[in-house]
Image (cartoon, rainbow, N blue to C red):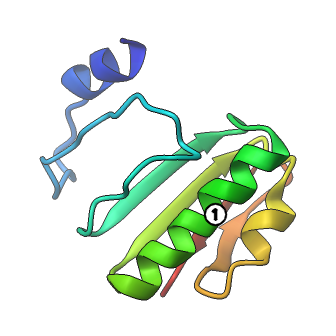
């Protein structure tokens, strides 16, 4: 509900994409859309669940190549993202990491 409220309130003159959707589901089992994505994670999963999510993400990228950005706050398990054959770290600090397949 908080995410939905934030999406509705967000206004920016620099905004270029107006198709923004928040989905609440088990991330370790979700079907990812085949369109370009920005995935926001705030250390939401156990190691086992994040490992499964990353396997799903890698399989999805292999089957449907597209641009994907992953923004990971409090990146306790960042090494799991770093193991992806499709993603590369493009920025961040000790508080967050950004990965993309660019």
Point 22% across, 43% down: residue? 20
Number of numbered discs visible in the structure rendering: 1
Mark 1 neighbour density, 10 Å: few (under 14) some (14–19) many (20 or more): some
Write the residue at 67% across / 70% down: 91
* Residue at x-position 51% and y-position 46%: 29
Residue 25, above or below 56? above
| 69 vs 63, nearest the viewer | 63
Tell me the element at label 1. Answer: helix
Per the image, the residue denoted by label 1 is 54
* Residue 56 or residue 5, whichever sits in front: 56
Residue 41 horizontal side relative to residue 67, left or right: right
Relative side of 98 to 70, left or right:
right
Above or below — where is 10 with respect to 14? above
Q: Is residue 9 above or below residue 1?
A: below
Residue, far front: 29
Q: Quadrant of residue 38?
A: bottom left
Coordinates of residue 47 in the picture (x, y in percent): 83, 47
Q: Quadrant of the N terminus?
A: top left
Q: Is residue 2 visible?
A: yes
Give coordinates of residue 53: x percent, y percent: 61, 55
Nearer to us in this view, 93 or 83: 83
Which residue appears at 20% of the width and 32% of the height? 11
The answer to which quarter of the image holds residue 43 is: top right
How far across and how far down the image is residue 68, in percent? 42, 71
Residue 95 can be seen in this image: no
Q: Is residue 77 left or right of residue 23?
A: right
């Amino acid at each position: 509900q908080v995410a939905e409220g934030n999406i509705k309130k967000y206004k920016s003159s620099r905004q270029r994409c107006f198709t923004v959707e928040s989905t609440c589901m088990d991330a370790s089992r979700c079907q990812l859309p085949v369109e370009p994505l920005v995935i926001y994670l705030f250390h939401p999963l156990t190691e086992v669940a994040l490992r499964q999510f990353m396997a799903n993400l890698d399989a999805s990228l292999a089957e449907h190549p597209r641009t994907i950005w992953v923004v990971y706050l409090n990146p306790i398990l960042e090494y799991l993202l770093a193991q992806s054959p499709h993603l590369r770290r493009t920025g961040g600090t000790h508080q967050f990491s950004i990965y993309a397949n660019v």
